[in-house]
Image (cartoon, rainbow, N blue to C red):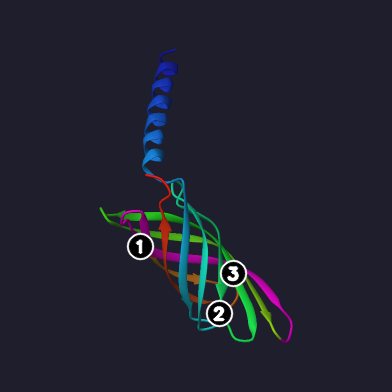
Amino acid sequence: MKNHRWSRVLVLCIGLLAARSAAAVSVVEPLAFANWRTDPGTGAVGGGAAIGVASFDVPAFEWVFVDDASDWAIDLDGHLPIMALPVVAFYLGAGAGYYSHDPDLGDSSTEFGMNALVGSKASIGRLKPYLEIRYTTAGPDGITVMLGTRFHLRD
């Protein structure tokens, strides 16, 4: 009986902490980014959304600028914070990627792969700019350097 009371107190405390944490963080944050891919040696732009509480990005769509083809990628990544400072936070992450290459002449190809990433993000008002370096095996293996921002929808 005594353990049952402690479990109620524990559940109540966890519930209060979770409610306070959820109130301080936007649950869903839209994101926009531009990046440079080492292979095929070109830039890309994209967008998606992030779930702030779980440090998880819902599939982000990326349009890759290549000559004589239509290339795009979709990434699904998770982040693990490693150091949080007052304005800047650093994280590691991993995820899955999908890359589609459709040349004007020839056969198209699609490929699934894995992502490994490291990055930092800052909080400046309603904007949360971030810089991320990612190694991906989806499509042409290579490193991408991404600069983007998340947008706060609520305070």
Query: Which residue lies at the image location 55% right of the left edge and 69% below the top edge?
Result: 62
Task: State if disc 3 and disc 1 touch (CB < 8 Å).
Answer: no
Q: For this rendering, which residue is in front, 48 or 73?
A: 48
Query: Which residue lies at the image location 25% right of the left edge and 53% below the top edge?
Result: 86
User: Which quadrant of the figure has residue 93?
Assistant: bottom left
SS category of the residue bearing label 3:
strand
| Mark 3 residue type | Ala
Residue 148 point in image, percent of width and height: 42, 66
Mark 1 or mark 3, earlier in chain: 3
Q: For this rendering, which residue is in front, 103 or 152?
A: 152
Mark 2 or mark 3, earlier in chain: 2
Residue 37 point in image, percent of width and height: 49, 78
Mark 1 to mark 2 CA distance (whole Å) = 25 Å
Question: Dot 2 corresponds to which residue?
Answer: 65
Query: Which residue lies at the image location 40% right of the left edge and 51% below the top edge?
Result: 152
- The range drawn in magenta is 105-130
70 shown above or below 19: below
Q: How would you classify the magenta stretch by its main secondary structure?
A: strand
Residue 82 point in image, percent of width and height: 35, 56
| Mark 2 residue type | Phe
The C terminus - image quarter: top left
Question: Dot 1 corresponds to which residue?
Answer: 120
Residue 78 point in image, percent of width and height: 49, 56
The N terminus - image quarter: top left
Q: How crowded is mark 2: few (under 14 residues within 10 Å), some or many (20 or more)?
A: some
Is residue 63 found inside the magenta-colored segment of the image? Answer: no
Front of the two marks 1 and 2 = 2
Q: Residue 62 vs residue 108: left or right?
A: left
SS category of the residue bearing label 2:
loop
Task: State if disc 3 and disc 2 touch (CB < 8 Å).
Answer: no
Label ID, residue 73: 3
104 shown above or below 155: below
